[in-house]
Image: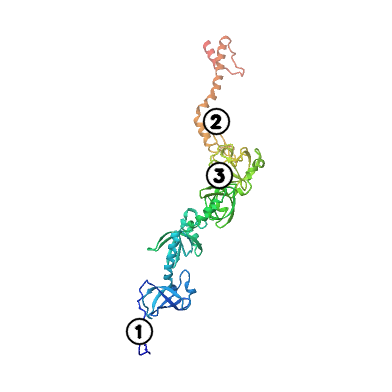
Amino acid sequence: MFKITDDNVTMEDLLSISVEYEKPTLGAVISGKVVSVSKNRLVVDLNGVAVGISTGRETHDSNDTIKDLAEGDDVKTVVIEEENEDGMVVLSLKRAAQFTSWDKFDKAYKDGDVIEVTITEANKGGLLIDVDGIKGFIPVSQLAPAHYPRVEDANSTQIRARLQKLVGIKLDVKIISLERSTGKMILSERAAQQTKAKASLGELKVGAQVKGRVSGVVKFGIFVTFNGLEGLVHISEIAWGHVSNPHQYAKVGNDVDVEIIGIENEKLSLSMKRLIPDPWSVIEEKYPIGSKVKGTVNRFSPFGAFVQLEDDINGLIHLSEISDTKVENPGDFLDIGEEVEAVVINIDRDEHRIGLSLKGKKKTSKKKDTPEDDDTESGEATEDGATEDKPLDDKTESGEATKDDAAEKEEKPKKKPAAKKKPAAKKKAPAKKKAAKKDKPLDDDTESGEATEDDTVEKDEDK
């Protein structure tokens, strides 16, 4: 209830000196003076005609303005509710800061400035920011090499896990797309580093040695970043010996020394092995042709078996040098992990090749595909023992005839009568004696004293 103390003041006078009151409208930006401030509560005097209040999340903007406010300070807010149950206008300090942030983003976009943002969220497609309710997105393709999630076969689960590690960190980015009307903003970390990267690239020379950090390991090599740049150590440049799995030589985050071996536009080729002595430079002295060496079979190929002689030195035993017999599959004669002694037969230092031979080592196939002897070790004939060139005897060592023997006898029944021709030849002798009797008659009696049939016939004829 108001009390007028000056009787000379009329109502018209009061209306003439009063501030014109405009009812706050939703979304309007209004100014006022701070009446009171606490951690999560702000009370504002709106030109003496209304009181506004901001609480909770609406009191915190990206710059945390509320921390710097004091009673009597001027402040801008946005009306988010015309009146609450207490008759106060509901305000948002956060949304008022959004207007300021949009203005800042507009200017940075037009001028091409680099700004700093804090990552608030990650998904398989990239990273997100939230500045006073303004959403921004950094696609995976726009990340700098150091943060690009290089994983095998583009596994979405692994990509998201890598990106999740970036939540909470600050990144320097450029705005590459902005639509204030729709609230869309696309950012690029890669674009923000291009200026610095180009400057660094211009200072590089082939043969230079640099320190870097592993940013990715894939089946074909190792990615290394340094000075805002990224290069690839191809699998053939990791070590002097054969490398089958790059993951055995480095992990993401490892610090490594590399040598620059190629620069093509923004593509850098790096090498790890060239920073260590080349064992092949003295290979001819260490493994002279004709010398015997020992090694372990570590892998097969369609043309032979590789033998590891030392960490970075492998020799090849060609299929033709594994055995004196024909070899189609080295696995038929050798085992992975098997230790062998071989002879060095050729060396090509430039191509990093050593030829080995096992010939003369009596290396036989592990497959039982060679014909067995006629008899087994037990002395029993096998079913295949009898061949056409060398038939088995009629009886085995046990004295029993085999089935093959019986069959052989049945096939050759005509050979036995040939042995009975001898008695037929003996019967010709008596015929010669008959002829002799006509010229010279035999005595009446034989030497045994018995008359023959011929004698009896002659006596009958005389009678």
The relative height of residue 51 versus residue 426 in the rendered view (above or below) is below
Farthest residue in the left direction? 12
According to the picture, the residue beneath numbered tag 1 turns out to be: 14
Q: CA distance from mark 2 to mark 1?
A: 142 Å
According to the picture, the residue beneath numbered tag 3 turns out to be: 300
Q: Amino acid at mark 2?
A: Asp
* Mark 2 or mark 1: whose residue is earlier in sequence: 1
Q: Amino acid at mark 1?
A: Leu
Dot 3 alpha-carbon crowd within 10 angstroms: few under 14, some 14 to 19, many 20 or more: some
Q: Amino acid at mark 3?
A: Phe
In percent of width and height, residue 273 lies at 60, 48
In percent of width and height, residue 460 lies at 52, 13
Q: Secondary structure at mark 3?
A: strand
The answer to whether 114 appears left or right of 28 in the picture is right
Q: Quadrant of the N terminus?
A: bottom left
| Label number found at residue 389 | 2
Q: CA distance from mark 3 to mark 1?
A: 104 Å
